[in-house]
Image: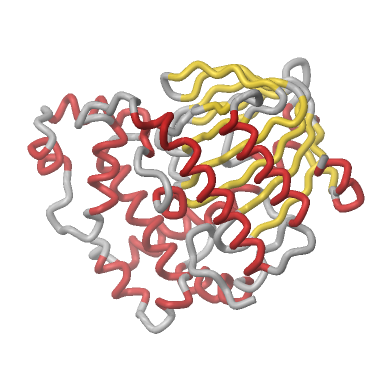
Amino acid sequence: MPIAVLAERRRHVASSSWLGGVFDLDAPGREADACDCDLFTRATANFVVAISSMGPLRLRRALGANLDAFAIKLLMQGSATGRAGLRRLECRAGDVVLFDLLQSLEMEAEAVSAVTLWAPRSRVLAVVEREEALHGLTLSAASPAGALVRGGLEALAAQSPHASAREFDCLADGVLAMLGKVIAPLLHGAAAPPLASFLGVRRYIDRNLRSPDLNADAIAKIFGLSRAALYRLFAPVGGVASYIRDARLQRAYREIVDPDCAHRRIGAIAYGLGFTNLSAFDRRFRDAFGASPREARAGRRAAAASPSCDEGLRTLLLRLGRPPNPA
């Protein structure tokens, strides 16, 4: 198994230093900071693979907490239970489970070993149409679909230390393409969410971030909602106005650090996403990402070729979605 193969490459960290900022953690019977994790990671600007072993841990993530990525997790040892949105989770060794980081998650895991592929939403949507049906979808170890995806994740984990960045991205894309094919029959009969679901409104917001008319009143009218109903829908993420602002900040970050946008002025990017006060934009950007827009552009350019895998998961996920770097 990959954990044994990569034993010499693992590092020993606290679970909180790896997962903090992505999940709220609680280690039953002890402090989360004391929960040890044996970890191997490989990261590019497009994917992150983590091979981990850790003790009992409870994870929680709130609806809409703004990291726009999916996790495809293979449990190699141990088990996990909980809820992914409205789905009940019961995962055992050999199962593959999918998580959408924009949706709520509560999971309690025994001592587990796992391989996890983290992918930006854009890559997942290129191969899967029904994104709303993915959160909590579990492929059992005994199913043909589960066996195929499990094999792909194990192969990706085993090749991660040796592949070039381009090879690694191609392998990860291959796993995603296979996943999309094998789960298509499972999603075909899945019930569609109501038009005015959180995901439905979020998709509309994400597609219209540049519109000057994107506001609560316009959204409520388009989806046939009262303002009160819209606010209730977005209350778990601090309200619809806060969500729009955070989504625009995330888009601004991706464009500012994107090498293909290096010729564009930061002010033009900000104005194009509805920020009319550049001083306020700079302050909000620094609060969200810990650096000014100029510092982020300079720092990401310097680190673009090879993200450091000594960083926490949140930092690596914030980099996802940029164009691939030449290998």
Q: Position of residue 302 (x, y in %)?
A: 62, 76
Q: Residue at x 52, y 57 (%)?
A: 320
66 relative to 263, above or below? above
Quarter of the view holding residue 252: bottom left
Quadrant into which the N terminus falls: top right
Relative to 160, 180 lies left or right: left
- Quadrant position of the C terminus in the picture: bottom right
Give 49 or 286, whichever is nearer the viewer: 49
Residue 107 position within the rendered picture, expressed as x and y whole percent measured from the top left? 59, 22
Q: Quadrant of residue 227?
A: top left
Query: In the rendered view, how is the structure colored?
Result: secondary structure
Left or right of 197? Residue 264 is right
Q: Quadrant of residue 217?
A: top left
Q: Residue at x 25, y 68 (%)?
A: 271
Total count of labels? 0
Q: Is residue 92 above or below residue 46?
A: above
User: Looking at the image, which residue is at 22% across and 54% down?
Assistant: 208
* Image side of residue 101 versus residue 245, left or right: right
Considering only vertical position in the picture, is 157 above or below 133?
below
The residue closer to the viewer here, 246 or 164, is: 164
